[in-house]
Amino acid sequence: MTKTTCLSKSRCKINIQPDFFGNILLSFSAFLSALIFVVSLSKKHSNFGTKLVLANFATLIICCGYLFLQFLEDNFSFIYVFENSSILLPTFYKISAFWSAHEGSFLLMILFLSGSMFINNSFFSGQVWMPISNATLSFILFFYLVFQIFTSNPFLTFDVLPNNGTDLNPLLQDPLLVIHPPVLFAGYVFYAVTFSLVIAGMFIGFDKKLFQSLKLWAGVSWFTLTFAILLGSIWAYYELGWGGYWFWDPVENVVLLPWLAGTAFTHSLIFSKNKILLSWMVFLGISTFLLTILASFVVRSGVLNSVHSFASDPSRGVFLLSLFGVFAFASLALFFSKSVFLQSEWPKLLSKQYLLVLNNVVLLAILLIVFLGTLYPIVTEVFYGQKLSIGPNYFSSLITPLVLILITLFSVEQFPNLLKINKRKFLLGVLSIALVVIIIDFLKISALSVGLYFVALVLSILLLKALVELATKRQINIAHKVFGHLSVVLLTFAVIANHQFSESLDVRLKPGEEVEFSNTVVRLDSVDVEGEMNFDTVVANFSIQSGETQSNLKSEKRVYKIGGVITSETGIVSTVQRDYHIVLGDRFQDGSWSIRYSINYGIMLIWISSILLLFSMLYGTIRRHGY
C-alpha cells in the first residue's frame, strides 16, 4: 500500500489499520506457543517440542528486528514509532525507544521469555522435567502474546505518513535508561523459568539435578533483578533531581515485591540437601512469579501516576489482572493438591536452618509492609474514591528495625558456637537485648543513631572475623556468603548514614555570587546557553570549595525542540564520603537562579556495597555449578 504524506490534520482523515507482516509474526508465534504446550505434554513428541522452541525464538527475533527497522528508518506511519521517536532523535535513542513505552517493552519481555526457554532447553536438554517446564512457559508465553496482539499491539499503522513523530520522553533520553528496562524485564522473565521448574518438581518430584537447575536460575534471576534495581536507583539519583536514590515511588515498590520474595526463595533453596520445608520453598517460587505479574499489572493498568509508569489504557490492566488470576488459581490449586507429596521436616530449634526460616519470615514481613503501603492507597481510591498518600516515613520507620533484625540473624549464623548455647543462656541474651532497647527509649536516643552504631559494630565484627579466618586458614570458608552478608551490612550502614547526615539548601544566586553552607562555599561562576541536536540547554557552571579542595560541576536546564518539554540535569561531584549535588531551578527577573544544593553522605558506599553484593551472588551461583 502506498502511504501519503499528511501536511495538515484538517485535510487528512486518518485511519488506523494493522501492519500485515508484524501481526503475522505475532500470530505465528502465538500458534507455535500453543503447539509447544500440546507437544510438550505428549511423551512421544517431547523432543519435537524442543525444536519448536527454537523456531518460536527465531520468529520473535525477526518480529523485534522488524520493529527496530521502523525506528531506524523513521517510519512514522507506525503509531508506536510516531509516539516514541522523531527525526531529531539521535540513533542511539531510536534503538532504546523500542522499549520506551508499553507495547515495545512487553514485546521485548516476550522475546526474553522465548529466549530463556531456548537457553533452558540448551543447558538441560533431555532432563525428565523439561517437557513440563516447556509446557508451563509456553502456556505463559501464549497468553502474553494474546495480550500483546489484542491490547498492546505495536504493529498498528496510520494510512498516511506523518512528517515527524512526537519524540521520546525526555526523561528516558539517558544512557542508563537504555540498559535499565531490558535488565528489569529479563529479571521478571527469569523468575518465570524458576516458576516452571517448581511446577515440574510438583509433578515429578525434586531430584538433585532439578535443584541444581533451580539454584542456577534463581541465582541468575536474583542477580538480574538486583542489577536492574541498582541501575534504576542510580538513574533516579542523578536524573530526577530530588537528591535521593529511592523515593518509595509505587512503581519502585512493586519491583521490590518480587525481589524480596525472590531473596527469600533463593535462601530457601539452601534447604534442598535435606529437603527441609520443601512446601515453603515451592510456595515462595510460585509467589515470586505471581508478584512479577502483579508488578506488570500495577504499572500498566492506569491505576497510578509515576515517572516510571507505562500506564495509559485501563483495559490492559483488566487483562493482566485476569491473567494474574488465572496463573494464581492454577498454580496455587496445584500446590495445595500436591501438598501431601511435599511434606518435609521442620528444622531444629536454634539450628542454622532455623535461623534461615526466621530470615525468610523477616523478609516476608518487609514484603507485607511494602505491599500494604503500595496497594492500600490504590484500593481506597478505587473502592471509596478517597485519595490516600503514604509517605517514605511509613516505610523507613517500619522496615529499618526489621532490617536490623535480619542483620542480627545472619550475623549470628556466622558463629556456630552461639547456636549451641542452652535455652537459659539464650533467654538471658534476649532479655538483655530487651533491656538495652528499654534504656535507649528512656534516654530518648535517636533511632537512626542507635541503628548506625549497631550496624557499624556488626560490620566491624564480621570484617574482623573474615580477616582472622584469612590469616589463620589462608582462605575464607564460603567466601561469597561472607562477602554477601558484609555488603548487606555495609549497604545498611551507608543508607542510615545518608539519612542521618545528609543536608540541603534552597537558595537564589546570580552569576559571580556565592553562598556558604555546611563548611563549603558554593559559587555560581557563569550561565551559558548551548544547542544540541534535539534540545537547547542552559548550562550553569558551579565551583565548590571545601577546605583546600575545589570541585567544579555543571547543572543544566534543557528545553526539547519537539514538545517544548523542560527537564533538569543534575550536577554531581562524588567522593567516597559524600556527594555534592546541585539542581538548577528557574530564572528570576533580577537575573538570579534558584538552586537546590545538597550534601549527600554515603552515596558512593551505597553503590559500592550494592556492586559487591551483586558480585558475591554471581560468584556463588557460578561456583556452585562449576562454570
Image (cartoon, rainbow, N blue to C red):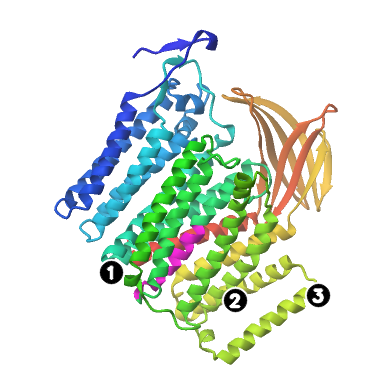
In depth, the one of 357 and 456 nearer the eye is: 357
Q: CA distance from mark 2 to mark 3?
A: 26 Å
Tag 3: amino acid: Leu
Q: Nearer the viewer, mark 2 or mark 1?
A: 1
Q: Callout 2, which amino acid? A: Ile
Residue beneath label 1, please? 207
Hey, what amino acid is under mark 1?
A: Asp
Q: Residue at x 45, y 21 (%)?
A: 76
Q: Position of residue 498 (x, y in %)?
A: 69, 58
| The C terminus lies in quadrant | bottom left
Figure check: 485 above or below 118: below
Disc number placed over residue 443 in the picture, else none: 3
Mark seen at residue 186: none
Query: Which portion, as a residue range, is magenta?
Result: 259-273
* Quarter of the image that includes the N terminus: top left
Q: Residue furthest right?
A: 590
**Is residue 269 rendered magenta in the image?**
yes
Name the foreground residue: 575 vs 98.
Answer: 98
Of tags 2 and 3, the one toward the viewer is 3
Give how far apart the Cα atoms at labels 3 and 1 are: 55 Å
Identify the secondary structure beneath mark 3. Answer: loop
Chain-order first, disc 2 or disc 1: 1
Residue 303 sits in which quadrant? Answer: top right
